[in-house]
Image (cartoon, rainbow, N blue to C red):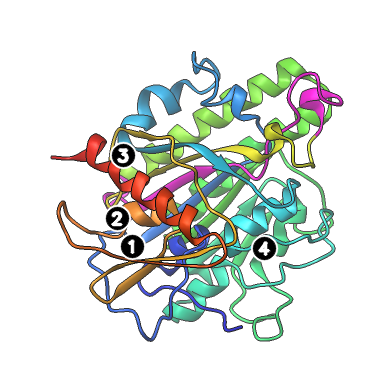
């Protein structure tokens, strides 16, 4: 099966499991030129947007939400561990890779795809993580990609096999690298909600979520002030996994199965090609069905709700919907419901 990526927004589309042939896709009229993905490791949805008071994510609720789209039914439907979860976000594929950093993703990451597509130098794609074991995301074991188009990285204290580092140190590195290199594709990991959870430190876990919320807001403000990124950058916040709900096993301390708490995660997206001040309860993906949405000759994978919003179609633009697969009828109904919801919420 060929590896396929989109054209000008290849990075964002790969993050969201959107794939199309680069040689076949016309140049879309997107304003987005840069993509920054911030992965906050391991908070439960019940402590982020799922808490109606939003007490642990005040910046997301009061500052960021009005700037973009929040997806309330976004899920990790694969392996709910750190490395597999990050690999899914950065390759668009679920995979059961080793969680200790001893196995590369089986398919190329968004970072590699961007470097190949753009022909840009290594410094235009950066992986910056609190967990050293996530350095694997800059490479792939795929025979056509292994050790090719490898991104720049700053992971853990000094790379794979060193140690985790505090999130504040990671954010210092993020701001320094963005100001110095102005990379176009950036993947960031903040790990303290996960580490505090595993340490059974409830107060620390909640504080870590608040700290990450503050880090996200500071990063967003930086992007708006830097002329290289302002009005040209897609900013995405998500999680690799959630955690067990209260009453299941050891509750917030652990994760790793297919329980609702582990699968349900946050997703927020903002940028010049996203709608603003929108909260969607449409499921973030549909499994085992191929859905193609087309505007003229431009095609995207309908599994990505974010890709639908970024298709660039104005109100009343004719769309062609092609549904194929074992679950095609249900998928077609879901797509129809999605656009009906959009017409209600977003009609000018």
Q: Which mark is residue 33?
A: 1
Q: Tag 2, which secondary structure?
A: loop
The first of marks 1 and 2 along the sequence is: 1
Nearer to the camera, 198 or 322: 322
Q: Are marks 3 and 4 in contact (CB under 8 Å)?
A: no
Q: Are marks 3 and 1 in contact (CB under 8 Å)?
A: no
Nearer to the camera, 223 or 7: 7
Q: Tag 4, which secondary structure?
A: helix
Label 2 crowd bin: few (<14), some (14–19), many (20+), radius 10 Å: some
Q: Residue at x 51, y 59 (%)?
A: 15
3D distance between C-alphas at marks 3 and 1? 28 Å
The residue at which mark 3 appears reads as 341
In this picture, is 64 found above or below 158?
above
229 is within the stretch colored magenta: yes
The first of marks 3 and 1 along the sequence is: 1
3D distance between C-alphas at marks 4 and 1? 22 Å
The first of marks 2 and 3 along the sequence is: 2
The first of marks 4 and 1 along the sequence is: 1
In this picture, is 272 found above or below 58?
below
The first of marks 4 and 2 along the sequence is: 4
- Is residue 347 shown left or right of residue 237? left
- Is residue 18 shown left or right of residue 189? left
The residue at which mark 2 appears reads as 232
Q: Tag 1, which secondary structure?
A: loop
The residue at which mark 4 appears reads as 137
Q: Residue at x 43, y 48 (%)?
A: 334
Q: Are marks 4 and 1 in contact (CB under 8 Å)?
A: no
Magenta-highlighted residues: 225-254
- Is residue 103 shown left or right of residue 109? right
């Amino acid at each position: 099966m060929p590896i396929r990526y989109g054209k000008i927004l290849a990075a964002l589309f790969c993050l969201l499991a959107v794939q199309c042939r680069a040689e076949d896709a016309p140049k879309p009229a997107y304003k987005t030129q840069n993509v920054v993905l911030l992965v906050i490791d391991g908070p439960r949805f019940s402590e982020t947007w799922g808490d109606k008071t939003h007490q642990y994510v005040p910046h997301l609720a009061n500052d960021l939400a009005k700037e973009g789209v929040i997806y309330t039914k976004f899920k990790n439907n694969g392996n709910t561990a750190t490395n597999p979860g990050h690999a899914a976000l950065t390759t668009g594929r679920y995979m059961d890779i080793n969680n200790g950093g001893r196995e590369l993703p089986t398919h190329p990451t968004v970072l590699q795809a961007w470097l190949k597509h753009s022909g840009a130098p290594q410094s235009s794609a950066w992986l910056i993580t609190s967990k050293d074991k996530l350095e694997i995301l800059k490479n792939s074991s795929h025979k056509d990609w292994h050790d090719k188009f490898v991104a720049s990285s700053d992971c853990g204290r000094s790379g794979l096999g060193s140690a985790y580092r505090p999130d504040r140190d990671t954010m210092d590195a993020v701001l320094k690298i963005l100001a110095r290199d102005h990379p176009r594709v950036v993947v960031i990991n903040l790990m303290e909600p996960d580490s505090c959870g595993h340490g059974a430190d409830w107060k620390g876990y909640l504080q870590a979520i608040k700290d990450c919320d503050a880090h996200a807001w500071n990063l967003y403000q930086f992007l708006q002030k830097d002329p290289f990124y302002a009005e040209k950058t897609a900013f995405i916040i998500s999680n690799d996994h959630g955690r067990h709900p209260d009453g299941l096993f050891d509750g917030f301390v652990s994760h790793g199965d297919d329980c609702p708490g582990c699968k349900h995660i946050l997703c927020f997206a903002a940028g010049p090609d996203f709608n603003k001040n929108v909260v969607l309860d449409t499921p973030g993906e549909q499994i085992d069905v191929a859905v193609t949405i087309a505007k003229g000759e431009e095609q995207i994978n309908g599994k990505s709700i974010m890709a639908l919003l970024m298709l660039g179609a104005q109100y009343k633009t004719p769309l062609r919907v092609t549904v194929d697969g074992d679950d095609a009828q249900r998928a077609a109904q879901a797509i129809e419901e999605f656009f009906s919801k959009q017409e209600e919420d977003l009609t000018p």
